[in-house]
Amino acid sequence: DLETGNWKLSFNGETVGFWLRTNYHPDFHLADEIQWGGEIVNERINGRHTSTQMGSGHFGREGMGKAAHIRHMEVYDRDLNPSDAAYPLIALATDPLCYDINDWGRTPMGRMITFGGPGYDALLCP
């Protein structure tokens, strides 16, 4: 919001996230990084990877209909003009045998990524 400096996250025109301006340093006006994707906590209890699934439990490479996805990825400039998220993105999976991410680029559904994975697997993700 240009008047208040508050930040919001919208989905299909509905606000689903909100951050007050007072949460940030007074000199902070624009973001220089945006992150999309999933995250799990892996405490390696009993010396093995967590069995927590990311998304639906399917790998991003399995695509739409199986993996979790984010589509119509847009960013807004200071004048609130939208544009597609950059392509290519920096796709990072810290445990690629357990979870992955696939950047589909510009599609008929806008900029899109799919991501996820099953977590623990005795052979692939110990």
Image: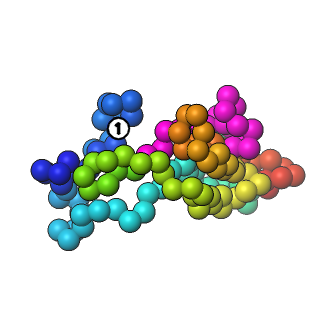
Q: Is residue 57 rendered magenta in the image?
A: yes
Asked if 91 appears above or below 65 in the picture, the reply is: below
Which residue appears at 60% of the width and 39% of the height? Answer: 107
Q: Position of residue 41 (x, y in %)?
A: 57, 53
Dominant SS in magenta: loop
Q: Quadrant of the C terminus?
A: bottom right
Judged from the image, the secondary structure of the residue bearing numbered disc 1 is strand
**Residue drawn at the location 48% of the way across and 51% of the way down:** 85
Where residue 47 sits, quadrant-wise, is bottom right
What type is the residue that disc 1 sits on? Ser
User: Which residues make up the magenta segment?
Assistant: 56-74
Q: Quadrant of residue 26?
A: bottom left
For residue 11: magenta? no
Classed neighbour count for the residue bearing mark 1: other residues with Cα under 10 Å, few (<14), some (14–19), many (≥20): few
Left or right of 92 on screen, residue 59: right
Give above or below for 36 relative to 25.
above
Residue for badge 1? 10
